[in-house]
Amino acid sequence: MRRMAEIAPESSATPYFRFRSAVGEHVLIVPHSRIFDLSGDAARDWDRDGHAARETALMLAAETLGEAGLSDVVMPQPQSISLNVSSACNLSCGYCYADRGKFAGAQPKRMDLDTARAAIDDLLLHADRASPVTIGFMGGEPLLNRALVQDVVHYAEKIAAGRGLDLRFSMTTNGTLLEPADIELMRSRRFALTVSVDGDGVVHDRQRPTPQGRGSYAALTKRLAPLIADPGNVQVAARMTVRSGTIDLAARVEAVLAIGFPEVGVSPLRMSADDSALAGEDWPKYLSELTTLSRKELATANTGGAIRLTNFAVALKQIHAGASSPYPCGAGGGYFSVAADGKWYTCHRAIGDPDYEVGESGTLDEQRRRTFLIERHVHSQTDCRCCWGRYLCSGSCHQEARNRTAESCDFIRDWLRFCLSAYCELSTCRPDFFLPRTVN
Amino acid sequence: MPELNGTKLLARNVAAVRRSSALAVEQVAGNPVSTRLESGVGNCFPGLECDLRNLERRFLPFLEVEFVTLVTSAGDREFILPVAVDMEGAERAFAAGALSEQDISIYRDIDAAIATGGLVAGIQLNGTFGILGRLELDLFEFIGMPAAGPGRVPPDLWTAVRMLTEGTPVEVTFLLQDRGVTLVLETTRARYLDDNGALSAAFLPGELTQSLCSPWTHDFRDCGCFYWASNHPDIVQPVFPAGTPPQDPQPWTVDVPWQRRERQVSTNPPPSATQNSPAPIEIRHYEINRRWQELHFVMGRRETTSAFKPIEQAGKPLPDLPALLAHLRYAAGVELGVAQEYLTAAYSLKPDDDATMAGNPQLRDDIRATRSELMRIAIGEMRHTRAVNDVVRALMPPGGFQPALQVARLLPPVPPSLIRPVEFRPANRAAIEDFIAIEAPSAGVDGLYFNILATLETPPPDVRPFAAPEWTEAISSIIAEGEDHFQTFLDIREWLAPYAESDYLRSTAPPRPLPGQAEHDALQQAYVQLLENLHLGYARGRLPGASPINAARVSMIEQIDPLAHAVAAKGFLVVFDELADDRFRPIDPP
């Protein structure tokens, strides 16, 4: 991993965020996301003397051995790619960012085997053996190019075995085309399967229809049932899209869980082809729904249960670990998305956008990567660089950042504040919740 | 969540624990991590580890001052000269309502006067000067008086400021010479330490050492302070020639001047230095500029001409993981055992207000120092118990850890093979000698840990997967602190040597209380509760166990300490009963 540049933080940016929970007073040290309890008079002292508080926070914020520098712009080797194997979809969801896989004409054809193999060769040749390598399948609907998926899995496994790599796969699918052969392929492998499912039959059929306007819920549940019943090594997760005007999360999440998913992740639309993205007044309602749902999950967890809302569970575990990054994701760093024509983009949302194209297999353009990483570093974001949530939100999805509004940012901060408090409560009631499940 | 002690920040998530751990292990070359401000050879003479005179430079909030002698019509007089104003801090205090409009304007005026190079001088100092009570010192008149008795005043201005009682009102009149005005600053005498006992944040790094001189060349000869650092003392024992036969008395064990002119190592030792020694025995001023490199380094009071080689202290690796775990569990028990012995000794000392010490402040101070150090060492042993438990936990398979909290029945052997039981005794001479013996380098407790350390450094196959550097460091730290304990017990022996045991002990043979003695019973209950909390905390592990561990710490101060005092006040020995509970029952050496 090479350090390409350093972008200094804003010197006036707040180094801490004070919050409280049911178990007491706390402070988040913003760099490196450290949480300290302020016991006794410490909270009063902290709030009384802002100067001393800032000095203490800066001292606590100092990087420790092994922690990545938050100002660094580093260029790791690609460690994971997604292959846009299909340029079509059997559904016709109005909000689809990918234009059913065609990306506004930028991806007219499906991916062929040579293109896929070239990308895999490039990925596996340089990947770091110490970390897992992931190959994802996207589209369009990736199962419309089933043969390629099968070929890629076997080809990549052979190469990875020779190089001693820990290879994993992922797929994002609408689930309606799953066949026993697909399930068989996945079950015996480390496969993370994300299924798009938006609620009960009524909501799902309305939001995710076929081009002919028919619903897709029945096909989804029928095709998915065998995998839900016996997932093998597959990690199955539901991803629910939330549009403006349909923010009744509790009922929809329950409906998705009733299908048999162990957990559900919800995703509010920030950009949409059919103008159904959440707008100003939607955000407070969305926050309210999300926190109400999370409080119920928290109550269950406090008494020994599991948390089934992926967003909440992931947030809590990341807060526990002290997740802290100047980037919201690995796009352009360790992660790339390969279009059907073999061009590499910073992520799957950017397919066809020349601003985010970074070369082809074997010939990544370092200068373009460097420029992307510098421009997208949270210290370069004038809106974000002073925010206390800057290393937790990290400016949010690169593709959606341009649609950021005061309301959407308030939502993020309020949600983070809720998760921070919830973490303190859960880690007091259930410290075992955060223990590693297996010890190597 | 229990109320935790003081104003501590408690790390909650992994990232916070990582930073806290880093803070705990951050080391710089130089003094060991256990060094505190009061560990240094602090004095008013330069050339030492810190110059305490620098503390008084910040006796007034937001001001940095010097004490300077100026010529007045009445003669030389000392004044308080502000050299810098912390205007940022003062303005912040003003904004927060802690300073009045009048106060802030004084600070602003002083700051402005300093900025323009004008003379600002404190000419009147009123306040409460410790045991001397309230005084009003007109610095144009004040010349100090070393006299004792009623009506006495401090001997000089710096001593006067040093005597000002912390937190009491102080009034300083400043003369702004350029403007010909006087300003009266009414404030309180600043505190040098914060609530946690740490040096006030007002002092900048390096500030306490800024006036130390570098003991070099001319300084050695010129400075008559007799307070050089330990490796450059004035008086030493001469280089011991190799192969010198043992003699009684050994003629080489003599005190000679370090800067003697005659530096040849001959068959006869150089002459001892006395008050009557002729002056030329030392290198002269002009000579030292040429011959400074002939001055020897001094180790253990004796000059050395060869490179210093520390004594190799090597342990013998234990054969396997079960043996290592058994030794560690016993080591935790030894820590608990000696901690209890030290506590018993500490509480056996006369309290500060004991009527028999009236009129003997030196005895009172020596007892107070002994008690403080015994308590400090006992606390150190408790920290070792914790560290050993951390190591045991790391060596156990997940879920297999049981806290090691059984008190040792016997202590490790002290050469020549003396094994003794844990024994509750007042701090009599025999006890202090035993404490010295058990803490001596390479012997007793140290010897036990050297074997554990060697096992972690050269691990047998079943230990190898767990032998992380963190655990080697933990055991090394315990050994290093044991060395400090040993040295401290030597000091304690020296402090108590001039006195009869009956001078400093509440009783030379206090009876052990029987069950039913109310204070003793209450102490035992608190002791069991303490162990329960420790057990719970250790069992939960570092992060989740913070609450019970802190509860245990708080109970030591709020419960155990007053109860132990109460037992001692009743004339009994403070002891900790053996417990039958499997978790806490006595443990035998492996």
Image: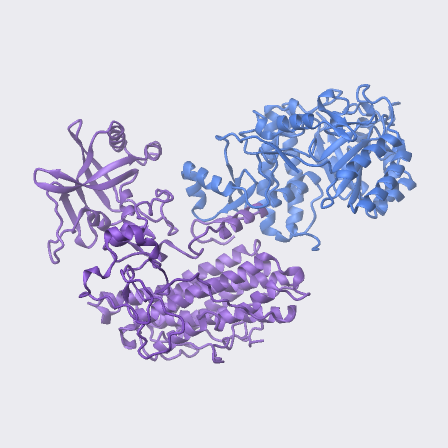
Left or right: where does residue A402 sit relative to residue B371? Answer: right
Q: Is any atom of residue B399 visible in this view?
A: no
User: What is chain A's hue in the picture?
Assistant: blue
Q: Nearer the viewer, residue B356 or A217?
A: B356
Q: Nearer the viewer, residue B273 or A140?
A: B273
Which residue sits at x=32%, y=49%? B214
User: Is residue A131 shown above or below A287?
Assistant: below
Residue occupying the far left of the picture:
B74
Give the vertical position of A270 relative to B59 (above or below): above
Residue B250 in the image, given as x and y percentages of width and height? 32, 76
**Residue B119 visible from this viewpoint:** yes
> How many marks are shown on the rendered structure?
0
* Residue A339 vertical position relative to residue A70 in the rendered view, above or below: above
Q: Left or right of B186: which side holds A423? A: right
Most foreground residue, A41 or B415: B415
Where residue B326 appears, as percent x and y from the top left, is 60, 71
Percent x, y of residue B183:
19, 33
Q: Note the chain letter of the purple one.
A: B
Quarter of the rendering containing residue B95: top left
* Residue beneath the point at 68% across and 25% down: A278
Looking at the picture, tell me which residue is in the foreground, A114 or B496.
A114
Q: What residue is at 34 percent from the left and 49 percent from the top?
A: B193
Would residue A401 be found to the left or right of residue A28 on screen? right
Name the residue: 44% across, 41% down.
Answer: A46
